Amino acid sequence: MFARVLPVALLVPPVGDRRVPIHLRVAVALALAVPFCCSIDISDAVVVDLPTYLLWLARNLSVGLILGGGVATILWASQMAGSYLQIAAGWLTPSSDDAPIGNVMYLLVAVLFVLIDGHHGVLMAFSESLEIIPLGPDAIGTAAQGALIGLPARMLLASLMIAAPALLAVLLALAMVAVAERLSTELGLAGISRSVTPLVALATLIAALPLTASVALWQMHMTVDYVLALLRQ
């Protein structure tokens, strides 16, 4: 049970945030594993050899990674989307680790996830996974394996979809600034775009933030439903 719940505690907000110490996340996983262990029937418990036990651990780790990774990929996709928007807005930084828009997007989606009780939904999905794939040494199905392998591709697709509304708005705003720059040149006011472009880009991102957050949450729901559907196969 601990092997299955550990990836969820490591990856899913609020305790799954990278700013939370790893030992605290492990402690939360232990605390979550206890009530789930009490909820299952242990009358059919058997003694297994070491290879079978290791296979059992690998199986439950995979299920936990699928559930926790499904949520985490949307958080990481939101951070990637923020990086796309930062580049589109022209806020290039010398360090690839310095991505303020990406960090804001990550925190925004994490906070919204908690506010809509997404963590409770993940626990319900985890409980359902115990019925779909009971604890045991049998290998998970090929569909579940495909879900685990396909998470990176789904993260890339989600990042593009999350960034799309704000990216389109930023590009349209920058196009309008370019037109204004052309007109200002003819009026003898060249260089006005250099001072207003960052402000226009920031205002556009703020205006598009509700739509961007809605797309991110929609992608998260879609990913969790997708993962559960594959686990049922």
Image (cartoon, rainbow, N blue to C red):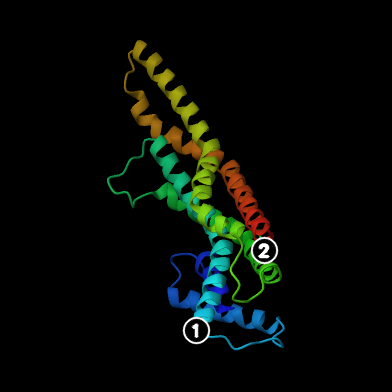
- Closer to the eye: label 2 or 1: 1
Read off the residue under disc 2: 121
Q: Along the polypeptide, which appears first: circle 2 or circle 1? A: 1
Q: Secondary structure at mark 2?
A: helix
Q: Position of residue 117 (x, y in %)?
A: 66, 62
Residue sitting at x 36%, y 39%? 91
Residue sitting at x 43%, y 24%? 177
**Residue type at numbered disc 1:** Leu
In this image, 93 relative to 153: left or right? left
In this image, 9 relative to 85: left or right? right
Q: Quadrant of the C terminus?
A: bottom right
Quadrant position of residue 60: bottom right
Q: Position of residue 138 (x, y in %)?
A: 61, 72
Instruction: Look at the picture and state if 53 lies above or below 87.
Output: below
Which of the labelled discs sits on residue 36, or is there none? none
Q: Position of residue 120 (x, y in %)?
A: 66, 66
Residue sitting at x 43%, y 66%? 19
Which of the labelled discs sits on residue 50, or is there none? 1
Instruction: Look at the picture and state if 35 lies above or below 185.
Output: below
Instruction: Look at the picture and state if 162 lies above or below 33.
Output: above
Other-residue count near label 1 (Cα within 10 Å), few / some / many at <14 / 14–19 / ≥20: few
**Residue type at numbered disc 2:** Gly
Residue sitting at x 45%, y 47%? 80
Q: Secondary structure at mark 1?
A: helix
Q: Nearer the viewer, residue 107 or 133?
A: 133
Q: How far apart, in angstroms, are the residues tagged by discs 2 and 1?
A: 34 Å
Q: Position of residue 131 (x, y in %)?
A: 71, 70
Q: Nearer the viewer, residue 198 or 121?
A: 121
Query: Residue 108: in sight, yes or no?
Result: no
